[in-house]
Amino acid sequence: MSDAKETQKDLQSADRDGGNSQGAGPPTMSVAEMLAAARGEKADGQQSPKAAQSGPAESVATPALPKPVADRAAPAAAAGAQGTWRINLFETVPLLKRIMKLRSFQFLVVLPNVLVFYLFFAVALFGNPMGNQNLMIMIVWILWWFVLIVFLVPFGSRVWCTVCPLPFFGDWIQRRELVRVRPGKTGALKNEFHGGTRPWPKKLRNIWMQNIGFLAMALFSALLVTRPMASLFVFALMVAAATIFAMIWRLRAFCNYLCPISGFLSLYAMTATLELRHVDGDVCLKCKDKSCLTGSENGWACPWGVYVGKLDRNNYCGLCMECVKSCPSDNISLFLRPFGTDIHLKHYDEAWKAFIMLVLAMVYSITLLGPYGWVKDLANVTWTGNVVGFLLYSLCIILACLVVLPIFHLIAISAGRALAWKEKLSRKKLFIGYAYTLVPLGLFAWIAFSFPLLLVNGSYILQVVSDPFGWGWDLFGTAEVPWTPILPDIVPYIQTVIMMIGLLYAIVKGYEVARSLYQERQSALWSFAPTTVYLCILTSVFLVFFTG
Amino acid sequence: MPQQSFSELTAEEVLLLAIDVERSNGIRLRTFSELFVDYAPDAAKLFAEMADEEDEHGRLLEATYKRRFGEAQRTVTEDDVQEVIEAHDLDDGEHLVFDDMNLRRALQIILKAEHQAEAFYRQATRAASDPELEELFRQLAEFEDGHVQWIETRLETLRESA
Ligand code: SF4
Ligand code: SF4
Ligand code: SF4
């Protein structure tokens, strides 16, 4: 500390002496401009993707466009983090803000879901054991899955987490409140928390467990969609885990690190046309308490441990709206933005998530929709009793997700790296960076998989809502609706169009990633070329399965 | 008080603002220290040390103010000016989700804020038309430079030991 102490002494003596003027040169910038230049930030207070990637030490020296601070507060339609348009929904629809600010907001939207969820438990226990005659299977695995993939995630980010019933008891245990907030002090957090207050283990602060959880669930997908008791078991396990985690570890450790649904949501929420972000970056810089993260007397600390002041992607924001209430400066809003705005994966576990999700979209399409009876037999171990076949099937999927696709990816990025030899980037940077291309492609592959699922099985849904337990009821007069697949002949065409849109987005967004990694346009093009080819090949494989 | 531009402040107001900046940074850094104490203890320790340092500087500036202007009758806070002078901040929204805070990153975060503050005061020194203000800015720049040197030395030591 000696240097700093010396400076203090200097200041005191300089103060006493009156000091010497060392100023030189006329002023060429306004004070606001100097500050902006000194901060090396973009005008809206957010770092450019390049600055964000280059790390703090490099960004210190990065000059940037100066702009008067007064102009920085984002107007209703303003430039987003990547320089694209975005619309401040709280400003455009003030009623929405009022609703989100209600303390009871989340409770009111979760409660009906909790009730329906436990009704499903009853249906699984006492209803028809045949999957296509059971309300739980039809609503959860067909309708919910379809709505989640086709609408909620692409347009609402993690809005499912806003209404999710799984962490209900865990939150209740930690907060001892359903609606109100308890100001107080729990470590760095400014709320009174109960239940688990331990930090989640350092070594597990990643999403590998989520990856494995989702993969494990997928291996048993054939069982889950045909046996209500199997689904009941998995959901009961998830509720129990979410509750036990809340009793041991602080905040939403289950959601952050284990929930398999979160794995899906966190990855594909990056593409969503909705984001929760701060409005004015300078307000966050000046903010002393960081209440969005630490909580306040008006809102709970962020359950996901996210700091909105520097939030630049959707992955881990569960849209619970606590920060909207706790921010003392009213500096958080929901924004509409273009599809696929967040384009940066940050870690290997996220890259592998992209591999796993893409392969599983293919596996589901083959197993659940494809004409390959023998694959179905291998997956349906409880029907066929073919344990060896099932193990083989599982091994193939695991290898495809964890080894084969990553190797293809590595080959593509290595080829690109060699082609862009003028600007050498680390393999790691390219591997993780270009893995993002599998996010739009994967999402559209899931959408392509989900469409026929609903079109073919939709009539079963009509049946089970009228007769949820399979006890011969006919509540809405639809119990006897015959099984009617909708437009089965044009399904492959719909899937082809969807996959082509996915490919287009993957290429466009991948090129954006390339441009953010490389200084030279030429290098970016060369580097991304092999990945483009591999994306086309992947899409072709999907099309073969969908149309074959 | 409606937000003013920094360039409109008097010497007295600049000093009051500098006091508030130091105090506010003390609060921010202490919060960061508490946030990371469980899984990045060395970073947390650094944040705590820097918080003490900012508090100490705040007290020093208060003494300077007292000698020059007597007992402070009012305050000028960061919120009263449009610009951000020095605000320590995390550099990622997901630090607490992932295990990516460490001593080096904490030093870099602090260095960034100190650099910005120093650069700002140096620019302000050159821009000042009033000699009294110019001298005050120069002193404040020196003040921040002390921090910068100290952090850079620590980063260098860390690099060498790595
Ligand atoms: S992360 Fe999983 S358990 Fe948590 S709210 Fe989202 S879906 Fe529900
Ligand atoms: S509490 Fe509000 S102003 Fe403070 S850092 Fe968070 S979003 Fe920004
Ligand atoms: S950032 Fe805000 S909305 Fe998102 S999870 Fe945290 S508190 Fe909830």
Image (cartoon, grey):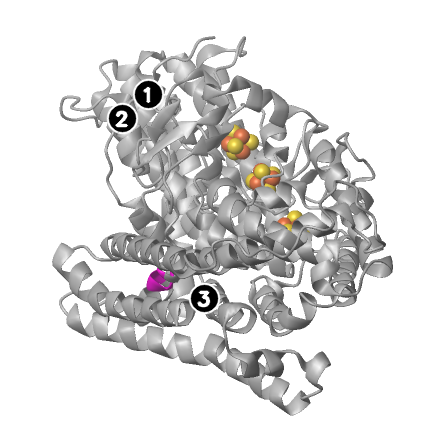
- Ligand 2 within 8 A of label 2's CB? no
From what the image shows, is residue B162 above or below residue B117?
A: below
Q: Nearer the viewer, residue A438 or A173?
A: A438
Query: Which chain does tag 1 point to?
Result: A
Discs 3/1, front: 3
Residues drawn in magenta: A433-437
Residue that numbered label 3 is attached to: A358
Res. A67 mark = 2
Say whether marks 1 and 2 touch (CB < 8 Å).
yes
Residue that numbered label 1 is attached to: A71
| Nearer-N-terminus badge (3/1) | 1
- Labels 2 and 3 positioned on one and the same chain: yes
Q: Is mark 2 on a helix, strand or loop?
A: loop
Queried whether the magenta region covers residue A318, the answer comes back as no
Residue type, label 1: Asp
- Ligand 2 within 8 A of label 1's CB? no
